Image (tube, grey):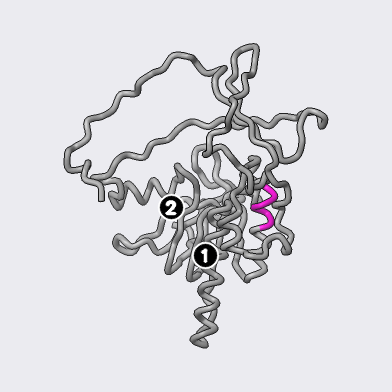
Amino acid sequence: MADREVLETDVLVVGGGPAGLAAAIRFKDLLDAQAKDSNALEASVMVVEKGAEFGAHNISGAVLDPISLKELIPDFASQGAPVTTSVTEDHVYFLTEARSLPLPIVPPPLQNHGNYVVSLNHLVKWLAQKAEARGIDCLAGFPGSELLYEGDAVVGVRTGDKGRDKNGKEKSNFEPGVDLRAKVTILTEGARGSLAKQAISRLKLDAGRFPQVYSIGLKELWQVAEDRFSAGLVQHSFGWPLSKAITVPKVLPVPVKMLAVQ
């Protein structure tokens, strides 16, 4: 068995996207304020990200409601957050193969005035800078491979080994993963995170609960001539190329006891 380096922290966040970095910043601010009031040692917070750098896996554009960012960093604008393009127009179109038909009104859930058009890549990079400025350890290139347990208590994460071939055998440049041990471990690795699936399976977190439901999302990056769009424009569409046929999904029978909702 390979000797593994062990790193300890108070709070470990797995996944360096917007949610993970926001959680780390919030924890660090709260813990530091508590330590200041009690004259205790400042608590340590660590974020590990599987990408080569923070933001490497965040390539989407997005419409951002700034309410959470205001709570996290109230003066985000003066601190240089890449949140500068306000939504100025909302449009909804029904698409056919040859035409786009505008809806006369924009449904309230699709109205984005007061929100911003942002690049998630730029926002994540900025959040990582703010996290590092607070003394948070931000480690890129560290994919989590398995959870560490003491009994049924999660006590950290083991990162993936490096230098294995496609069959899993050690190569000459092999480096064993690191054991990151923490008092609190937060998984922010996405909707189908590998560590979350491990925890759900071992701890039976889905027992007696409705199964999680997922949908497939496709992302495309288009290069558009500058005279074809304006800053702050948000367009929603539905219809073609999807089928016009309506398919009713099969629903599994639900036990009566699961219908009681408080």
On screen, residue 166 above or below 242? below
> Residue tagged by mark 2?
146
The residue drawn where x is 57% and y is 54% is: 16
Toward the viewer: 89 or 212?
89
- The 10 Å Cα crowd at callout 2, few under 14, some 14 to 19, many 20 or more, is some
Is 120 covered by the magenta stretch? no
For numbered disc 2, what is the local secondary structure? strand
The residue drawn where x is 65% and y is 14% is: 99
Looking at the picture, which amino acid does disc 2 mark? Glu
Q: Main secondary structure of the magenta part?
A: helix
> Residue tagged by mark 1?
5
Please state which of the two labelled residues, at mark 2 or mark 1, is closer to the viewer.
Answer: 2
The residue drawn where x is 33% and y is 62% is: 153
The residue drawn where x is 55% and y is 45% is: 164
Where is residue 124? Give x, y as percent. 64, 53
Q: Which residues are magenta?
A: 121-126
Asked whether the beta carbons under mark 2 and mark 1 sit within 8 Å of each other, the answer is no
On screen, residue 89 above or below 120? above
Looking at the picture, which amino acid does disc 1 mark? Glu
- The 10 Å Cα crowd at callout 1, few under 14, some 14 to 19, many 20 or more, is few
Outermost bottom residue: 39
Toward the viewer: 19 or 78?
78
Is 122 covered by the magenta stretch? yes
Where is residue 30? Give x, y as percent. 52, 72
Toward the viewer: 213 or 244?
244
Distance of label 2 from label 1 (alpha carbons): 15 Å
